[in-house]
Image: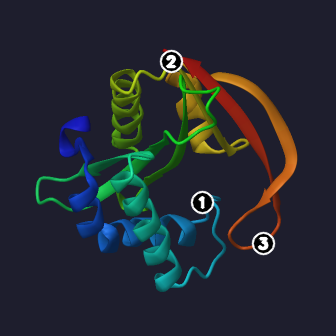
Amino acid sequence: MTDEARVRRIGANEAGACVDALADVLVDCVEGGASVGFMWPLPRERALAFWRGVAEGVARGERVLLIAEDAHGRILGTVQMILSLPDNQPHRGDIAKMLVRREARRRGIAQQLMAAIDEEARRERRSVLVLDTVTGGDAERLYARAGWQRVGEVPRYALMPGGGFCSTTFFFKHL
């Protein structure tokens, strides 16, 4: 039931105003074991600093930031597209930090976020998207169902939030 969430792009001013709520989403996901670049325990100030940096990147036009929110405006999930890439890759976007609160999962929110980021990529004239995810996780299955092509796997690529290595699978998508 995807009618529970509204997905939209937020600009620089609103991104700054959403830092606290986005930090809550990040902390929840990392606490739940998501390998998204942070270790557990994740200090709130570290999560806030990350999202402040994202907001600054949005303000500079280096990132696209989408949020999924419920009818009350509570942020349930988010995804980003990094636009600031080398000069020879103006057609590419890197998808990053696709996060959905644990309590809001299995409602189609991640699918909505991924469909919306495809549309934003088209608006930004990006025809090749890339991302990476923990091998064997729920997100890997989500991306495959959404038409992403698996490129390969790198064993021991990162650490899980509680420690221990995990493999990472890389995907691409042509729009």
Q: Where is residue 169 in the image (x, y as percent from the top left)?
A: 74, 37
Q: Position of residue 13 (x, y in %)?
A: 22, 60
Which residue shows up at 78% across the image and 72% down it?
163
Q: In this view, does 59 lie above or below 50?
A: above
Left or right: where does residue 44 sit relative to residue 107? right
Which residue shows up at 54% across the image and 46% down it?
96
Q: In which quarter of the image is residue 6?
A: top left
Q: Which mark is residue 163?
A: 3
Say which of 71 and 10 sits in front.
10
Label 1 or label 2, whichever lies nearer to me, is: 2
Numbered disc 1: secondary structure = loop
Does any portion of residue 105 appear in the rendered image?
no
Residue under label 2, please give it. 127
Q: In this view, does 71 lie above or below 154?
A: below
**Which three-letter amino acid code belongs to the residue tagged 2?**
Ser
Q: Position of residue 161 (x, y in %)?
A: 68, 69
| Residue located farthest toward the front when viewing the structure as drawn | 87
Numbered disc 2: secondary structure = loop
**Which three-letter amino acid code belongs to the residue tagged 1?**
Ala
Q: Residue 34 carries which label?
A: 1
Q: How crowded is mark 2: few (under 14 residues within 10 Å), some or many (20 or more)?
A: some
Distance CA(mark 1)–CA(mark 2): 28 Å
Distance CA(mark 2)–CA(mark 3): 36 Å
